[in-house]
């Protein structure tokens, strides 16, 4: 037992970084200097880097713009429908800006199918988050306000969410502004959360390029 404890303590000593306070200062031309010692980032720096990477992934997901016309052409079973046909049906010009036509998108595009075929591979971290969300425990009031789309999300027992609807909640990005607003309210002294209705499907603006 003592030998094992001794080995463990020696291994820990080897793995731990040296105490830089013990390093003497030498200014001597006779000393041959090697490469400078690379400092190991502290745990706080490592966690900060991980958080930055996570935020970057989320920002890429939030700002991702999909060409839904191409997706509709790929998913349609009507071989007579062309790219030109879907362009006329899925896009509309309003105040000199080209926007997606919401009703047509819901009719012709299966966003869950797109996510399973393309989105999950393109955003593996978001796919992992979706799996965690689908297998989550019963939500509290704050979580329900963030992810809900109205009174039709939670079932009567308020203990689980239908998988298809939960998948839609994860894929759609309509709760982002609401989530940020609630976070800001929580940071204020005496702030309280209040649920507000949100659209069930809000695709990003169409790219005109």
Image (cartoon, grey):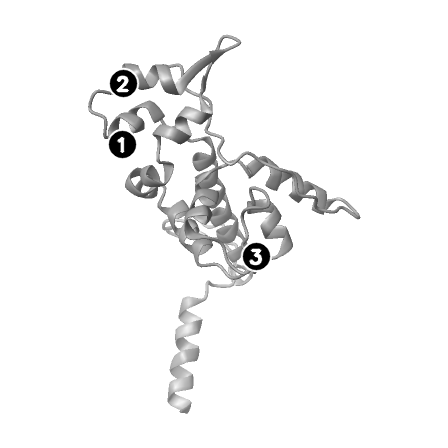
Above or below, comparing residue 21 to residue 185 in the picture = below
> Closer to the camera, 209 or 18?
209
Residue topped by disc 1: 75
Q: Distance of mark 2 from mark 1, alpha carbons?
A: 12 Å
Above or below, comparing residue 27 to residue 123 in the picture = below
> Which mark identifies residue 203?
none
Q: Nearest to the eye among marks 3 and 2: give it.
A: 3
Q: Say which residue appears at 46% left-offset and 50% top-offset.
A: 28
Disc 2 and disc 1 in contact, CB within 8 angstroms: no
Q: Say which residue appears at 55% left-offset and 42% top-offset.
A: 149
Q: Distance of mark 3 from mark 2, alpha carbons?
A: 43 Å
| Residue lying furthest top | 96
Q: From this viewpoint, is residue 67 visible? A: no
> Which mark identifies residue 83?
2
Crowd class of label 2 (few under 14; some 14 to 19; many from 20; radius 10 Å):
some
> Which mark identifies residue 156?
3
Q: Say which residue appears at 55% left-offset and 39% top-offset.
A: 175
Disc 3 and disc 1 in contact, CB within 8 angstroms: no
Quadrant including the C terminus: top left
Above or below, comparing residue 18 to residue 184 in the picture = below
| Residue lying furthest right | 190
Snapshot quadrant of residue 111: top left
What x and y, as percent, mark residue 167? 42, 46
Q: Say which residue appears at 55% left-offset and 38% top-offset.
A: 176
Above or below, comparing residue 117 to residue 17 in the picture = above
What x and y, as percent, mark residue 193? 70, 46
Crowd class of label 3 (few under 14; some 14 to 19; many from 20; radius 10 Å):
few
Choose the circle earlier in sequence order: 3 or 2. Answer: 2
| Residue lying furthest bottom | 1
What x and y, as percent, mark residue 140? 61, 57
> Closer to the camera, 151 or 52?
151
């Amino acid at each position: 037992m003592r030998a094992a404890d001794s080995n463990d303590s020696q291994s820990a000593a080897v793995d731990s970084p040296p105490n830089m306070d013990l390093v003497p200062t030498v200014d001597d031309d006779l000393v041959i200097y090697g490469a400078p010692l690379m400092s190991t980032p502290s745990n706080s720096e490592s966690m900060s880097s991980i958080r930055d990477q996570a935020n970057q992934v989320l920002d890429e997901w939030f700002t991702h713009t999909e060409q839904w016309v191409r997706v509709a052409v790929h998913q349609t079973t009507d071989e007579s429908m062309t790219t030109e046909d879907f362009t006329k049906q899925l896009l509309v010009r309003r105040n000199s800006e080209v926007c997606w036509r919401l009703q047509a998108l819901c009719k012709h595009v299966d966003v869950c199918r797109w996510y399973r075929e393309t989105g999950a591979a393109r955003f593996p971290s978001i796919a992992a988050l979706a799996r965690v969300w689908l297998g989550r425990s019963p939500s509290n009031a704050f979580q329900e306000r963030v992810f809900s789309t109205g009174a039709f999300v939670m079932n009567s027992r308020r203990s689980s969410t239908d998988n298809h609807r939960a998948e839609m909640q994860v894929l759609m990005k309509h709760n982002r502004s609401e989530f940020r607003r609630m976070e800001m309210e929580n940071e204020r002294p005496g702030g309280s959360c209040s649920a507000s209705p949100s659209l069930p499907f809000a695709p990003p603006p169409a790219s005109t390029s």
